[in-house]
Image (tube, grey):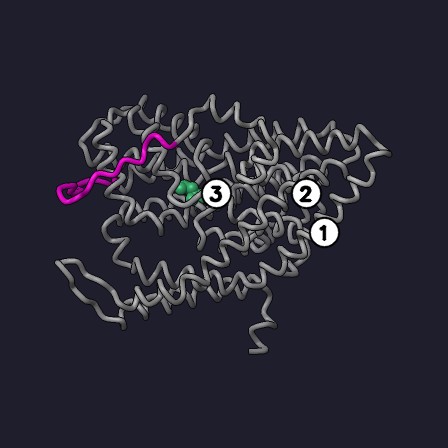
Amino acid sequence: MGWWFKLVLWQRVLGALLLGVAVGLAFRSFGGTVVVDGVTHYPGAEFVTIWIKPFGTAFVQLIKMLVVPLVFTTLVTGITSMGHPSKLGTIGVRAFLLYVFTTLVAVSIGLFFGSIFKPGSGVDFTDVAPNVLAGKAPSMTERLINIIPANPVHALANGDMLAIIFFALLLGVAILMVGKKAKPVEDFFKASVEIMFKITHWVMEVAPYGVFALITWVTATKGVETFSSVLMLALALYLGCITHMLVMYGGLIKFVLRLPLIRFFRGILDAQVVAYSTSTSAGTLPVTIACVQDNLGIKPVVAGSVLPLGATINMDGTSLYLGLLALFAANAFGLDVTMADYALIAMTATLASIGTASIPSASLFMLAIVLPVIGVSPEQIALMVGFILPFDRPLDMMRTMTNVTGDAAVATAVAKWEGELDEEVYRTVAKV
Ligand code: ASP
């Protein structure tokens, strides 16, 4: 076993992912099948769900446990270590503009691949049970008002990210303004960050096992045939997301920031694999923050502010998917899509992705916002959700990975522009 621990973390995490696919497929095929009331069951997959998946769930709980304390303490310390809050405005504006820009590019790539692969053509909805997910998404005004926490403790307890960012910003700035008297509080937060990072690094050590359990479970329960029912959609999504990561983020890192690209992808690989296996970008946040600080040299003020904001509002994989699903609906229900419709889809998908929660399958809640613009009725939306939900997990994995990669790319850009990037760390081979 010594060789296993000699590997650096990202190699162990990647190895666990590949092993999980192989073991999951083995359980599915060697466990045989049982048909009960016309429904095919896979005993091998059921074994995995009972005996292996809980290890994955435990890992997800472990990283989720760190999200709130890590984000809160990192952001407060990031601001106090800046010495002056003047930079906050430019960090926020730059991050926000870049988030919106990359999201628009993503949805355009989604529409491009959607018009090539034509997902949804010839789909048969006769046996599909409608599923209404609409109504759970809060309105824009509500979301904006809720950025101000009526009760900060409540916001922390609920993991309400934007409200936590808001309060942490005020707290950090106030500590700076109060000055000498607030020094003990400043030191307290500094020490807390160190402590939270210590725990984060422990949790990351178990990432390979968590990733293995989750991937084994997904492959055993879904198998590869999952993809065949939504083949064109899956192909368009995977190719679209890969293109977006290479062209948009790759172009930004290499040509705009003039930084080595391989280092970027190598540096955030742990976060990408964790995002891929857990399907939640908010849950992955502690790993993303640790990766960009340890491996890319992004300073806490940017990592602690841009990444939590990104995990909440920047979802390029999601907007790309929403664009694809709009074309899926148009093809499945025989609707005409004009040039103006494309523009409308791009705008609503961008807005909807900003409002999407960073949890598994959250995109599907947003169909109620995007699809009506091209004339899809609520009944048709319910049918589509019912059709896609069972296949959504492998698609969700890819878009979550894209979402997290986008957050890290924007954080790198903002850090570089603000002089908050330690290029020596960035250019050194990742330690973990
Ligand atoms: N699962 C995605 C995320 O957490 C959101 C989605 O597209 O469903 O980033």
Magenta-drawn stretch contains 412: no
- Is residue 111 or residue 234 the one in the foreground? 234
Q: Is residue 349 left or right of residue 416?
A: left
Q: Which residues are magenta?
A: 118-136
Q: Position of residue 300 (x, y in %)?
A: 69, 43
Q: Position of residue 325 (x, y in %)?
A: 30, 37
Q: Give the quadrant of ligand 1.
A: top left
Name the residue tied to disc 2.
Answer: 73
Q: Is residue 17 left or right of residue 43?
A: right
Q: Is mark 2 within 8 Å of ligand 1?
A: no
- Which numbered disc, 1 or 3, marks the residue closer to the eye? 1
For disc 3, the neighbor class at 10 Å (few under 14, some 14 to 19, many from 20) is: many
What type is the residue that disc 2 sits on? Thr
For disc 2, the neighbor class at 10 Å (few under 14, some 14 to 19, many from 20) is: many
If the image is split into quadrants, where does the C terminus sit?
Answer: bottom right
Q: Main secondary structure of the magenta part?
A: loop
Query: In whole angstroms, how far apart are the C-alphas of marks 3 and 2?
Result: 23 Å
Which residue is at 17% across, 58% downward?
39
Please tell me which of labels 1 and 3 falls first in the chain.
1
| Count of marks, rendered view | 3
Q: Secondary structure at mark 2?
A: helix
Evaluate whether residue 300 shows in this view: yes
Name the residue tied to disc 1.
Answer: 194
